[in-house]
Image (cartoon, grey):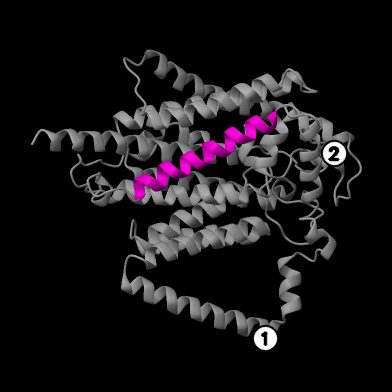
Amino acid sequence: MYNVAGIQRIKRLPFFQFFFRYPIFLLTFGPPIFRHSTGIDVTKGIVDIWAYIQVGWISMFAFRALFRLVTAKSIYIPKRIQVVLNMAFSLGILYMVSAAYSPARFVSAAYAIFYILAWICAAEFIIDVYRNPPNWIQCLFQLRTVCLILLILVVITLPFEPDFVMPVAARYFRLIGGAVAPMPVICPVIAIISAYAFFYSLESKSRSIVFFAAGLGGTLATQARSSELVLLLSLLIIVIIRARVGRRAAYLFTSGFIFSMLLIGILMGFIGFDRIWNYFNRGQELKGIESASGRIQIWNFVVNYCMAHPLGMGYVAGFRIIFRNYFGIEQQVEVTHIGNAHNSFFQVLADAGWLALAIYLIMIAMIVFLGWRFIYTSPTVVLESNSVPRHAMMCALIMFLFCLLDGTATSDFDVPLRAAFYIQNLIIAMILGISARMIAVSHMLYDSLSHE
């Protein structure tokens, strides 16, 4: 139990009761899909028992959320939170409209519905925590628990069905996770939460170190450069923020930075810069590095197509089918194995055009602004004394930053029915939920002060 100054103490819920109370955390499981991920024509998609399980998974939680919203006696959301939710649902409407000109109308419409259902779950969570706030630190740890369970499933699957969790033709060992779990996402999330908990003593140091090692080791096992670099940046932000609040932390940060530079210099001297560079780039040729493994050509194609067709190609399915007919591109894999734009922002552009991209960018900016505002708000608002939501907000913002930066190399954060999409949605819901609750508390404090 955490002591919160000026606010009623919020106890931790038992493990299973927490997930029953906030099922949006269960939604982040995905759920795991145990199928081969190699040699699949992603432009056609797959309809099997696992696809029906995915649809049933999101439908089960969305209909529960919708029922709670419909039967609620009253619903109130602060105006600033309403604006963000309105933008999210406006994107859903644009995705639904895009089905009218999509090459696969039914598929685009279905994905648009799944997108809206996911945001209904997020909206219900925000409304719920506005009235009855949870223990926000427990929310962080439960998200980490979900990611740890997914990591364990990947590790268990590896010796029995390695094709499920890693590419067979890879030159290096790459534990990507396949359809079982997005390792380049869940492992950095584990590492970020554990590192933040370690520096701010939110749990035992040994526990944080063990989980951080698991997250860091899993990230390195993915051999995904974008995840590795963004995780490094996220950890650096945590350390810098911690160093600003205490001399001891600043001293440790400076000492650690100097030691790291000396260690890097020694390693480069003994191992050799060429060998280190070759390992980091997975033996990739300079041409592949300059084109970001072919992503730049994909993004050029998206921009050129949307210049001629401002409304985009159609949600999810549009890119899959239209790009299949585009063969003037030099790729390391077959065109039929490229099912998305490999960039969250270009994926939104491809899905529903320039208007959708503008709404998406404004929505992201507002989410970051809300979170940042309530971290560095005035002392009259409770965040100065209420460290629990402040820590949860800061950690959630760092994870959201990870999703945004890692999204420059993958589109998984924008495609429904994928764990990465649900994880980002949950992080956004936490940021908005904390913001909504802090708005309510600030109003209560203002009213109490005005009556004194």
In this picture, which residue range is highlighted in magenta?
352-375
Identify the residue under disc 2: 336
Residue at left 44%, top 57%? 194
Identify the residue under disc 1: 269
**Which amino acid type is marked by label 2?**
Thr
Q: Is residue 368 magenta?
A: yes
**Which amino acid type is marked by label 1?**
Gly
How far is mark 2 from mark 1, CA to CA?
43 Å
- Between 59 and 239, the one lying in front of the other is 239
Residue count near mark 1 (Cα–Cα under 10 Å), binned few <14, some 14–19, many ≥20:
few
Residue at left 47%, top 61%? 237
Which quadrant of the structure image shows residue 316? top right
Question: Is residue 45 among the parts visible in the rendering?
Answer: no
In the figure, is residue 205 to the left or right of 34? left
Report x, y in % for residue 331: 86, 50
Report x, y in % for residue 321: 82, 30
Residue at left 72%, top 79%? 273
Give the SS element for disc 1: helix
Residue at left 24%, top 34%? 443
